Image: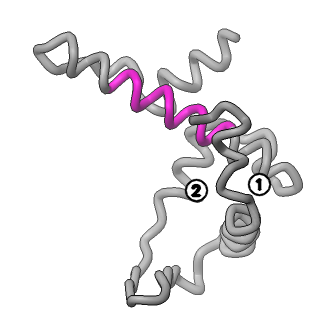
Amino acid sequence: MENCLKEQKLGLHSDRTSTHTFEGNQLRLWFASIAYILINALREQCLAKTEFKNATVETIRAKLLKLGAVITISKRRVLIAISSACPYQEIFTTVYKCLSQLPSQSIVNNGLI
C-alpha cells in the first residue's frame, strides 16, 4: 500500500495542493487519484505482456504517454502519427489495439468510473 501511495505522490504529483481554496486542492487530488486508477488499469489490462508490466506510474507516463505526435482529426477518424524513431512504438501500438478492443461498458462494470 505504501508503494501505491508513493507512486501516486511522486508519479502523478498528488501532493501539489498549491491553490488557495480547499475545493481546488480537493479537485487536484481527485484528478491525481483518477489518473492513478486509469494508469493502473492500463498496466494490468494492456501492458501485462510487455516490458512495462511492472513499470511504475512515472515510467509509463514518461515513456508512453508523453510523446510528441501529430494528431489529425477528420469527420470519420482521429489519426495519431508518432515518429518512426520512437523506441516504444510497438508497445504503443499494442496498447492502442488493446484499448480499441475493450468494450465501452467494461470500464463502468469494473468499477473504474
What's the coloring here?
A: one colour
Residue 46, label in figure: 1
Query: In which quadrant of the rendered view does residue 98 lie?
Result: bottom right
Residue 39 lies within the magenta run = yes
Q: Quadrant of the C terminus?
A: top right
| Location of residue 32 with respect to 20 vertically, above or below | below
Q: Position of residue 32 (x, y in %)?
A: 44, 29
Q: Quadrant of the N terminus?
A: top right
Q: Position of residue 67 (x, y in %)?
A: 48, 66
- The residue carrying pointer 2 sits among few (fewer than 14), some (14 to 19) or many (20 or more) residues within 10 Å by Cα, namely some
| Location of residue 21 with respect to 7 vertically, above or below | above
- Whole-angstrom CA distance, mark 2 to mark 1, is 15 Å
Secondary structure mostly seen in magenta is: helix
What residue is rendered at 21% in x and 16% in y? 23
Query: In which quadrant of the rendered view does residue 18 lie?
Result: top left
What residue is rendered at 52% in x and 80% in y? 82
Residue matched to label 2: 63
- Region rendered in magenta: 28-40
Residue situated in front as seen by the camera: 106 or 6:
106
Q: Position of residue 70 (x, y in %)?
A: 40, 82
**SS of the residue under disc 1:** loop
What residue is rendered at 67% in x and 17% in y? 3
Q: Residue furthest right?
A: 49
